[in-house]
Image: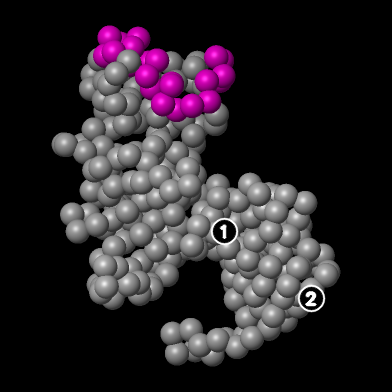
Amino acid sequence: MNEEQLTPIVEELTKVLDGKASREEIEEQVNTYANVYKVEDPRRIKEAILRKHGMGPTIDTSFVTADHVSKKIAELRGNENRVDILAKVVFAENRTATIKGSQRKLVSGILGDETGTASFTVWDGENCSLEKGSVYRFRNAYTKLWNDKVQINIGNNGTIAKEDVQIDVPGSAPAGNGPANGMKMKIADLKGSEPNVDLEVKAIAAERRTVNIRGETKEIISGTIGDETGTAQFTVWEARGANVEEGKSYTFLSAYTKLWNDQVQVNIGNKGAVEP
């Protein structure tokens, strides 16, 4: 692990131990477990160091704030009831859903921090506006598992506050023009929360059409792509200058994925590209 990955572990342990060990001692111990003993799981590192200082293996190794905790995305287990999360908005969209017979405005998308990404939903999206690329602190969120994937939820008791900090999400596209280097993946490995992936695929079906999005007419290309591991639906949201034909092979650069009706969808936005 590098310094950027170790720092959050050191900071959380420093707060939890609260004077039982100096920051320098904690830094040395964290580095030893991570880079000498090769322990890759942050939770195991924290549990081992807490035991070393007599705090027992059963203590919650997340930073405790009042009656709820602050966690990194990789530490979420899908059963948290009250958790604080500091994360960057990788993707967000406002939409309307029918819930128990009534229309409700939601905000959903993908959140990320330096440890990973997860899908999220703000269930009361009437006055909620989240900016892609901005960092927010989500308080009193709760999590669930859906198809073995953690989903972050912000309900009536949750709050959202914008933070003036920077978070680098692994694999996310930086500011600027053109595609960034994405993580090379196969379709079967996609989880529906990837912010930036590269795919080698074959177009099984493709259709160019015009849609109206928030009052703006757009030309898109959508259909089905596949590789040797499986298939997925796709959409190229900026079709001008792009071309996808059935039966031909393409490289999708800097795509992002979402889950829709439990199915992974591959999307090419304005930071992505399609190459033959």
Work out whether residue 20 or residue 24 is closer to the camera in this orientation and state it: 20
Q: Is residue 123 visible?
A: yes
Q: Which residues are magenta?
A: 35-56
Tag 1's secondary structure? strand
Q: Front-most of 236 and 189?
A: 189
Q: Secondary structure at mark 2?
A: loop
Provide the residue designation for mark 2: 245
Q: What residue did someone put label 1 on?
A: 264
Name the residue located 56 percent from the left edge and 15 percent from the top edge: 36
Question: Residue 115 or 266: which is nearer the viewer?
Answer: 266
Image x and y of residue 168, in percent = 49, 49
Q: Is residue 135 above or below residue 218?
A: above
Task: Examine the image and state in which quarter residue 272 appears.
Answer: bottom right
What amino acid is found at the position of numbered circle 2 in the picture?
Answer: Glu
Q: Indicate whether 270 appears above or below 123.
A: below
| Residue 160 pos. (x, y %) | 26, 58
